[in-house]
Image: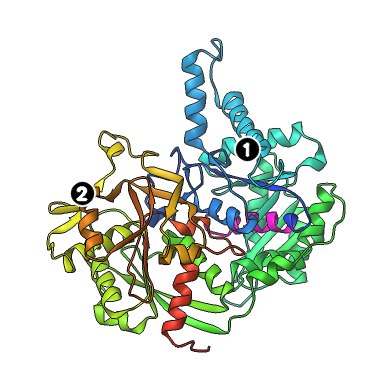
Amino acid sequence: MSGLGKGITAASVGRILKNRGYGITAVKIDPYLNIDAGTMNPGQHGEVFVLSDGSEVDLDLGNYERFLDIDLSSAHNITTGKVYRTVIDKERRGDFLGETVQIIPHITDEIKECIRFAAEKEVPGQKMADICLVEIGGTVGDIESMPFLEAVRQMRGELLLEDTVIIHVTLIPEDTMGDLKTKPTQHSVKALRELGLHADIIVGRSDRPIGSHTKRKISAFCDLPLKGVISAATAPDIYQVPLELEKEGLGDVLSEHLGLEKRKADISWYHQVTQEYTERVNVAIVSKYGIEDVYLSIKEALKHAGRALSTEVRITWLDSERYEQKQLAEFDGILVPGGFGKRGMEGKVDAIEWARTTGTPFLGLCLGFQMAVVEYSRHVLGWGDATSAEMGEGKHVIAILPEQYDVTELGGTMRLGNSPITLKDGTLAMKVYGQKEIEERHRHRYEVDPRYIPDLENAGLVFSGAFQNRMEICELPNHPFFMATQFHPEFRSRPTRPSPPFIGFVKACHEKNGGRAR
């Protein structure tokens, strides 16, 4: 079932195996016809995560990168659109030598080839992986996922028995009497069997732990050993999930199925990412999207920074079209994230003006960076009509990137992925990063118009990071913390390696509230 927690389960399985010393890589299969997630509405599908090579992918790959501390590539996100486009391109070139092109074998063969390619692709920082996780999105029985499940069935027969394991994540709902019900799992397993697949392990998702009676019932009806039924109750923090699954014996069951040597798990990662908080700060995120999954990486990056500083970051989401400016006085810091389009822009500008004039710590990301420049142009330079070319008529202090002038297709055409950035000595950015040369991920079509940079700098705005003539970071020197980035630092944040701008922001928020204890 969509939204059940397959991505977190897959990432947790990878973490469990990595803690045993195995090299892990991961593949997310999305059955939709889109080539990638770049053109999808984040309000419906969740955050568009950007990889280092510029691929726009499903948010589950962000979870993989955070849990496994690896950098993935476009090859690790397989979609129906990608598969069909590749097969049709081959057919047009005549690669099939006149064969009738069909779902089986041509589509399924391409799926298998994509999985093998991703599994064998080296992940930066580690040798070729020992184990590849493959998460198939959607629901068993969906029309769009059928070719992928068939490809898995074929691969299962082509490989040695101990080289594969199927983990089936199912819902264990609770009725009005408080009893956990196994019927949905029984029917789901039956549907899987009808496709020729047998689950080796069932991970049952429920709000509370699954007891031994329910486990025995699932074991009996679904024809698998009792130790293969794993309880995955809702946890207070996603980084606790691998440890909870470890306690359920998942690591040992996996090792047995895959014929792995028994190794003691290194659990130091859990202690690093789930330590107790001693302080707290309250942060407002001013956005036109009121759905947390749209900004999942920002939420996680704030959590990473908070853990490193033993500071709980309590987030309040403020609708940029409806909030009242006086509400901002309640918060220790203000964050304005990325986004597209004119709607809600003025509310973001007002929030930035409040942060600038009241000395409230501020972090702007992508569009938040652009709106910080717009706000400064309007209220310090006095250019009342200053705006972005994306927003309509006025003085375009934010202009479209030159390489975007003739772009007609939306998918995969923005400035995307890693880019080097040079920082200025003696700036907040230099203090936060601690090095002159950095690299961060991008996703944007607009930039600060170079014609207005001298005026902005002469008026006191500092552009402390740049790539060639493109401004990447702006800040205010006489402010507790005022920083905005054209890039997305949240995409590279990890539980054990928090993003530097987020560390600086949370630290400044804590200093503002006087170190208030919990």
> Which mark sits nearer the N-terminus, 2 or 1?
1
Label 2 belongs to which residue?
451
User: Would residue 56 appear left or right of 278 to someone viewing this image?
Assistant: left
Provide the residue designation for mark 1: 118
Q: Residue furthest right?
A: 261
Residue 112 seen in this snapshot? yes
Q: Tell me which residue sits at (12%, 59%) in the image.
A: 385
Please tell me whether mark 2 sits on a helix, a strand or a loop. helix
- Residue 280: give x, y in percent of width and height: 50, 82
- Is residue 497 placed above or below 175 in the rendered structure? above
* Residue 6 located within the stretch drawn in magenta: yes
Residue 401 inside the magenta-drawn segment: no
Query: Splitting the image into 4 quarters, where does residue 465 fall?
Result: bottom left
The residue tagged with tag 1: helix, strand or loop?
helix
Separation of residues labelled 2 and 1 (CA atoms) = 44 Å
| Residue 282 location (% of width, % of height) | 43, 80
Residue at 55% x, 14% y is 95
Report the magenta residues as a range.
1-16
Count neighbours of disc 1 (C-alpha within 10 A) and say few if under 14, some if 14 to 19, many if 20 or more.
many
Q: Give the dominant element type of the magenta stretch: helix, strand or loop.
A: helix
Q: What x and y, as percent, mark residue 227?
A: 81, 61
Residue 487 screen position, x and y as percent: 40, 54
